[in-house]
Amino acid sequence: MSILTDNVIPGNHGKIFGTNAIEDIDLIEIKSSLLELDGIKEVLLNTEIFPREFTVHTSKMIPISDIENRVKLVGFHAIPKEIFKL
């Protein structure tokens, strides 16, 4: 593994995650839970596609495992998408 695949890197590109949450209320609960983590500055929800996705923007490097574990506490899963294209 590498620093890019194991962490969310600060910047304007963020990291996209897929989730098994379907209802808007569940996605909002995931968003609120993630915003409690130190270093997460924004969570954007994409409810137009299935499976649902959310994008996490950070102000510092955060391990993907921290995000996955936080979403599990809400009762759902977060699966990171591929690394952004340069």
Image: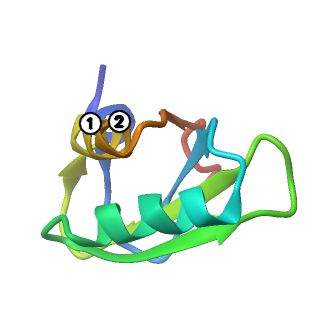
Is residue 60 visible to the viewer in this orientation of the structure? yes
Q: Are marks 1 and 2 in contact (CB under 8 Å)?
A: yes
Q: Residue at x 44, y 58 (%)?
A: 30
73 left or right of 84?
A: left
Q: Quadrant of the N terminus?
A: top left
* Amino acid type shown at disc 2: Lys
Is 69 above or below relative to 44? Answer: above
Is 32 above or below relative to 7? Answer: below
Q: Residue furthest top?
A: 1
Q: Position of residue 24 (x, y in %)?
A: 68, 64
Q: State the residue position of label 2.
A: 72
Is 46 above or below relative to 62? Answer: below
76 left or right of 18?
A: left
Helix, strand or loop under label 2: helix
* Amino acid type shown at disc 1: Asn
Q: Residue at x 48, y 33 (%)?
A: 77
Near-viewer residue (63 or 78): 78
> Which quarter of the figure has residue 33?
bottom left
Q: Which mark is residue 21?
A: none
